[in-house]
Amino acid sequence: MALRVGVVGGGQLARMMIAPAVELGVELRVLAEEAGMSASLAATAVGDYRDADTVLAFARDVDVVTFDHEHVPQDVLAALVDAGVAVHPGPAALRFAQDKLLMRARLQELGMPQPDWAAVSNTDELQAFIDDHGGRAVVKTPRGGYDGKGVRVVSAATEADDWFAALAEDARGGALLAEELVDFSRELAQQVARRPSGAVRAYPVVETVQRDGVCAEVIAPAPHAAERLQRVASTIGVGIADGLGVTGMLAVELFETTDERLLVNELAMRPHNSGHWSQDGAITSQFEQHLRAVLDLPLGDADPVAEWSVMVNILGGPAADSLDARFAAAMTEHPAAKVHTYGKAPRPGRKVGHVNVAGSDLDEVAYQARAAASFFVD
Amino acid sequence: MALRVGVVGGGQLARMMIAPAVELGVELRVLAEEAGMSASLAATAVGDYRDADTVLAFARDVDVVTFDHEHVPQDVLAALVDAGVAVHPGPAALRFAQDKLLMRARLQELGMPQPDWAAVSNTDELQAFIDDHGGRAVVKTPRGGYDGKGVRVVSAATEADDWFAALAEDARGGALLAEELVDFSRELAQQVARRPSGAVRAYPVVETVQRDGVCAEVIAPAPHAAERLQRVASTIGVGIADGLGVTGMLAVELFETTDERLLVNELAMRPHNSGHWSQDGAITSQFEQHLRAVLDLPLGDADPVAEWSVMVNILGGPAADSLDARFAAAMTEHPAAKVHTYGKAPRPGRKVGHVNVAGSDLDEVAYQARAAASFFVD
C-alpha cells in the first residue's frame, strides 16, 4: 500500500510535489481551495481549509497532513492533532510562521541574529522605535502577510495608522511588529529539511534577488560566499529548524549586512521559492525532500548537481493563451532551460512559472535563465 | 488552454511522462488497459487498445496520440489517422517496430549495419541459415516479442517447430526471422528524439547490461567509447529516425562486436529502459523529450548533467508490502540514489522500479546504484 500524503492548499507548491510523489510511489492528495487550481491533477477534495470538519474529513484517509501554505488556523490544526492525525509541520512550529511577533520573540530566546525589533501597540510606541533607529523602520502586520504584503517602510508612525485601526477592531488584538531597516548588501536564503525524528539536511545557502518585494531570481549557491558564511547560514537554518521543531522543509530568509553579518528576515515552513532551483540543480529537490521529511523517510542528498543553478520567476503577462507560443520560442532559443509552469492564468505580476538553468559557468547560466524567462514578459 | 497528450497504454512509461507533463503544463491523458495500472494517476480512460472505437473515443479530446508500447494494431492506427488525429509515432514508422522482418528489410535498404538475417518460412530454410552461420542462429517471432520473449538461440531448426506451427495457424501467415548470432563484446543503445518537423536530438550512446534477456543496468555514457564510436552510434540513430520517419523517442539497441563494429539489434519507438538514466542524469529526460517531440515543440538539450550516470532496474521480489521498508533502508544507506517506482505489485523478475545515480566517479556511481537497488532484491 502506497504511503499517502495530504496537502492542504492547491497552489504551485502542492503542484510541484506531484512529480516526486509519482516517482517515489507516494499517493498525493490535495485539498484545494477551489476547482482548477495549480495542483488540480492531484486535487481529491475542494473545500475551505479554515473549516475543521472539512480538513478532518480530508485527513481521514492520509498518513500525514502537510501544507501548501501556512494559513491553516491553529484551531483547525489542533482539531487534527486531537483526532490523532500526523501533521507536519505541526501547530507548535507553524505558530511561529503565522505570527511574526511570536517568531521574533522565539528567535531571540534561541539567540539567533536578527534585526532590532519591537512589538508596538500604538503610534507613540512606533514613533519611539523610529526615532531610536535613525528615523525609519519596517512595520509588519504579524499575521497574514506574504510577498511584500503586510510590510511597509515608514519614516513616521502615522503611516501605519490604518493598521493600528484594524488591530483595534481585531478580536485577537495585539501589536504590530516594528523592525530596524537593515543596511543589507544582499539577501540570502538557507533551506533545511528536518524529519520528525530529528535528522536534518541543509541545502547550500543561496542568493535571492527581490523586485517589488517579490522573489525575482535565485542563484545557487550564493556567489562569493566564503566558507564561514556558508557555515553560519547552515548553523542558523539547522538551529531554527531544531529550535522551533520544524518538520518538512524550512526556508530562512536572511539579510547579509554590509558589515558581513547574517540577520534572519522571514521564515517559511514549506517548500519555498528560494528552493525551486533544486528541481534541476540538486540531487534531491525540495519537493521530494519535503515529502520524505513529512513521511519521516530518510532524507536525500541536498548537494547541487552542477556548480551553478539560476532560477528566474515568470511573472505573468496579460494574455491567458499566449503561454504556449512563448514557451516554444523560449524552448527554441534556450534548449538547456527547464521551464516549470503552474497552470495559472497569467495576470500582471502573478507568479505563473519559473525557469531553471544549471551549469558550470555562472554568467552563461544566469544569461540563459534570464533570457528564457524574458520570453514570458511583455 | 493546455496542450493535451493522449497516451495509449498505462504502464510505467506512461507513468513517467506524468512528472514532466505537470512541469511543462501539458495535460496528460492515459488510456489504460485496466484500473490500477502504473499510470493510474493520469488514467482518464480504461479500455482495449485493439478496439478502434475505444481508441477513437479516447483520441477525440487530445491534441496528439502517442504510446506506452508499440502494440496498437495497424487498423486501429489507420482509423485514427483517417479521423484526422495526430499520431506520433505514426503507423508507417510503427510498422517497423511491430514487425522485425519489415524492420530488417528497411534497415537493409537504408544501408544500416546489422547482423546477417533471413526470412525463414520453414524448418528447411532455417536449417540452411543455421548451417551457413556456424551451426547456430537467433530465431525471432517477427511480431509481439519483448524483454527476451519471442527470441531463441537455436542450433537445430527443429527447436523452432512450435513457432512454425503457430505461424501456419496465423491468418497473417509470414515467416520467422533468423539472425546471425553476433559475437559481441557488449550491448549499447542510442536514443534519438525527432519532431514531426524533422528536427532531431541525439543522446549520448550508453552501455546496456542484460541479464536473462532483460535490461539490468545502463551506464551513461558508454565507458571507453571512442569519439568515432559515439559518432557512428549517433549517425545510425539519426539515420534510422529519419529513414523510418520516427517521431518522438527512438531507441536503437546495438551490438558492439569484438572487431569494433556496431550492428543494429532492436528498435523501440517510445521512451525506453536504456534511457531511464536521463531522468536524473540529463538536462532533458527522455520522458520530457518524448512529450516535446510528439507535440512538435522545440526539443531540449540532451546533454548529461554529470560525467556518469548509472541506472539499475529493480526486479521485484515476492512480497507486495515490502517495498516501503526496503525503500527506507535504501534511502538511508544511499542518500544520493534516486529511486523511481512504478506502482506495480512486485513479483519475481518483474520490473517494478529503478535506481539512478549520477556523479563524477564511475566506480562510486555504479556502486551506489547497484547497492541501493540490491535492497529491493531478495
Image: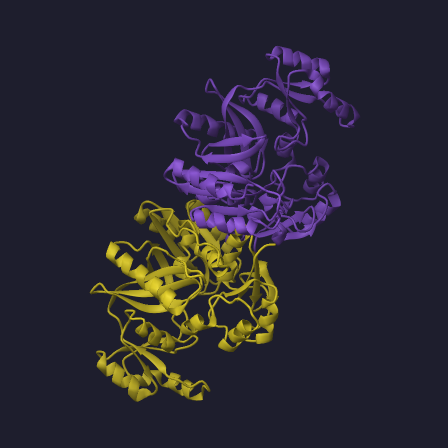
Chain colours: A purple, B yellow
Q: Residue furthest front?
A: A378
Which percent across, then down, holds residue B166?
Answer: 42, 85
Depth check, front residue: A278 or A193: A278
A34 versus B315 height, above or below: above
Image-quadrant location for residue B122: bottom left
| Quarter of the image with the C terminus of chain A in it | top right
Image-quadrant location for residue A11: top right
In this rendering, would B285 be left or right of B232? right
A87 versus A118 height, above or below: below
Which percent across, then down, holds residue A90?
Answer: 63, 37
A85 versus A257 height, above or below: below
Image-quadrant location for residue A111: top right
Depth check, front residue: A13 or B330: A13
Residue B22 appears in the picture as rendered: yes
Number of on-image labels:
0
User: What residue lies at 55% left-to-right and 52% top-to-bottom?
Assistant: A324
Which percent across, then down, holds residue B292?
Answer: 48, 56
Q: Residue furthest left?
A: B259
User: What residue lies at 57% left-to-right and 75% top-to-bottom?
Assistant: B52
| Quarter of the image with the N terminus of chain A in it | bottom right
User: What residue lies at 37% left-to-right and 38% top-to-bottom?
Assistant: A361
Residue B330 appears in the picture as rendered: no
Depth check, front residue: A248 or B268: B268
Depth check, front residue: A108 or B47: B47
Which percent across, then down, holds residue B74?
Answer: 49, 76
